[in-house]
Image: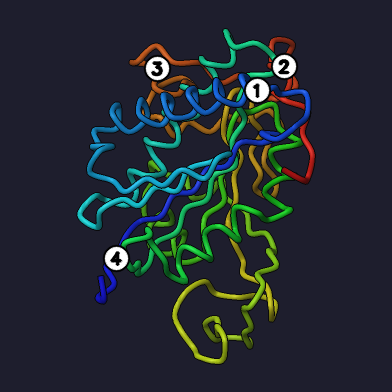
Amino acid sequence: MDVAVHRTIVCVDVEGFGDRRRTNRDQVAVRAGLYRALRTAFARSKIDWDSCYHEDRGDGVLVLVPAEVPKELLVAPVLGKLAGALARYNQVAGHQRRIRLRAAVHAGEVHYDEHGVAGMAINTTFRLLAADALKEILCGSPGALALIASQWFYDEVIRHSPKCKPTTYRPVRVAVKETKTSPGSGPSHAGHRGGGATLWPPGWPMAPIIAIGHGIQLLMAGARPGSVVDLGGGEGGDIGAADGEAEFVGAGEPDAKPPAWPCSRGR
């Protein structure tokens, strides 16, 4: 397709997918569990999974959501439902088959061709997904999912939606290759200026980030340790309580779950 179309972009990546302690059968089971959790989260958020473009990445998935779907739904409730589905899956999965996810959200123009999709917005989302800051947040959390949002997505979507809990986000610095900027400008890619994330300080996009999952801790300045974020639309600190999904517990509480998989800053 010669003409680009606007899409909401969601990328997820399994922590420790290629760890040598996982066998091939473990990896197949993890992939099956991941897709089942994604389908469940989209279905319970009333978003048709089959109407979205999804591309397998081996240890993760790229999802492009049609422009007519309200973007705030991709944070609350989709990611909240996803974290709940993962928590339920991990409670019964063997250790080598447990899943913890890094997730990134952005939006922008995308080109389709006979090979798949392409676009700077997709590149930016994957670079956010690979950020050390995101890996460190998940590594330090007992939760099942950590989320990073582009500055554009935070400013245009999350900040205006109480359901997305915007005050629980904090900015982090993320190195983005092939991206340069100057104070007060948008990013410049390969010599030509374009829209996108606000970069601060020069050379760094300021990307809000939050970890969500089973036993989480708020990541905003001055937050009370053990506070809970509910992006699932439930009550009393539950993710999707009406759907019987896993409850949040405060970080550090006696029954808080340990990380599902030994974490690292690498894959």
> Label 1: how many residues lie within 10 Å, few (<14), some (14-19) or many (20+)?
many
| Residue at mark 3 | 241
Across and down, in percent, residue 31 comes to: 52, 28
Please name whichever residue, 251 or 204, is drawn nearer the observer in this view of the structure. Answer: 204
| Residue at mark 4 | 6
Please name whichever residue, 69 or 49, is drawn nearer the observer in this view of the structure. Answer: 49
Spatial distance from mark 4 to mark 2, Cα to Cα? 43 Å
> Label 2: how many residues lie within 10 Å, few (<14), some (14-19) or many (20+)?
few
Mark 3 / mark 1, whichever is N-terminal: 3
Mark 4 / mark 2, whichever is N-terminal: 4
Spatial distance from mark 2 to mark 1, Cα to Cα? 6 Å
Dot 4 amino acid type: His
Is 4 situated left or right of 9 in this image? Answer: left
Q: Measured along the vertical axis of the image, is residue 127 above or below residue 231?
A: below
Dot 1 amino acid type: Gly
> Label 4: how many residues lie within 10 Å, few (<14), some (14-19) or many (20+)?
some
| Residue at mark 1 | 250
| Residue at mark 2 | 253
